[in-house]
Amino acid sequence: MLIFLLKKYLLSKVLLGYLLGNFILLTASFLIGKALASFLPEWLLGILGILPIYLAFRKENDSDNDKAEHQSEITNTLITYLSVCAGCNLSIFLPVLVGETITNFIITLGFIGLLTIIIVFVINFISDIPAVANVMTKHGEKLMKVCYVLIGLYVFWDSGLIHHLLALI
C-alpha cells in the first residue's frame, strides 16, 4: 500500500497523511484502552492479545481498490491508510497501550512518529528494487502473520495474563 501511494503522490504528502493516520489510530487505541482499564484489571485486558493473533489467521478479503478520490494527496493517503489499516492497527495498538501512562503514550507517539518517517523514506528508497518486490510477493504475508502472533503473545505475557492463569493452576 505504501509503495503504491509513494508512486502516485509526492513523498511529503504521503508522509504527512501516513503520520496523521498513525497518530489518529494510536490516540484512539490509548483512549479506548484507558476506558477499558478503568473498570477491568490489567491481567484480564491481556485477553486483547487474541486480536492480533486472530488477524494472523483470518481469511483475507482485502480488495480495497474502491477508494474515494479527493482533491488533497494528504487526505487521500490518510483515508487510504485508515481504511486499509484501522482494524489491524487498532487490534495491535490497543492491547499494547492499554496499561500505559500518558507519559509513556506520548513517548510511544513520538517513537512511532519517528519510525513512520524513517519507514516512509526507506520504502520510498527500496520500492524500485526488484528483489524486494519479489520477496514481499513470496513471503510478505507469512512474515506479517508471524509478527501478529508474536505481538499477541507479548500482550498475553506483558499484561500478566499468563502469570495469573498459571497461578490459578
Image (spheres, rainbow, N blue to C red):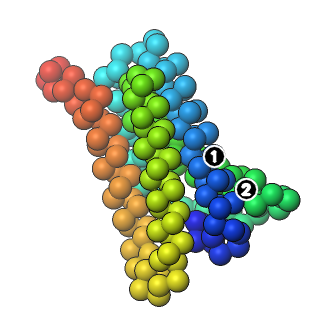
| Mark number, residue 74 | 2
**Where is residue 54 drawn, in percent x and y?**
43, 47
Helix, strand or loop at mark 2: helix
Q: Which residue is mark 1?
A: 20
Q: Count neighbours of disc 2 (C-alpha within 10 A) and say few if under 14, some if 14 to 19, many if 20 or more.
A: many
**Where is residue 61 drawn, in percent x and y?**
60, 61
Q: Is residue 52 left or right of residue 19?
A: left
**Where is residue 11 drawn, in percent x and y?**
63, 66
How far apart are labels 1 and 2 at the CA level?
9 Å
Question: Residue visible at 52% across and 33% down?
Answer: 29
Helix, strand or loop at mark 1: helix
The residue under label 2 is which amino acid type?
Ile
Quadrant the C terminus occupies: top left
Question: Residue visible at 58% across and 33% down?
Answer: 28
The residue under label 1 is which amino acid type?
Leu
Residue 57 against residue 159 in the figure, above or below:
below
- Outermost residue, top side: 39
- Outermost residue, bottom side: 130
Quarter-wise, where is residue 10 in the image? bottom right
Question: Residue visible at 32% across and 37% down?
Answer: 155
Residue 132 visible: yes
CB of mark 1 within 8 Å of CB of mark 2? yes
Question: Residue visible at 80% across and 57% down?
Answer: 72
Quadrant the N terminus occupies: bottom right
Residue 92 visible: no
Residue 134 against residue 24 in the figure, above or below:
below
Quarter-wise, where is residue 46 in the image? top left
Q: Who is closer to the viewer here, 166 or 45?
A: 45
**Where is residue 21 drawn, in percent x and y?**
62, 47
Residue 78 against residue 108 in the figure, above or below:
below
Q: Who is closer to the viewer here, 18 or 1?
A: 18
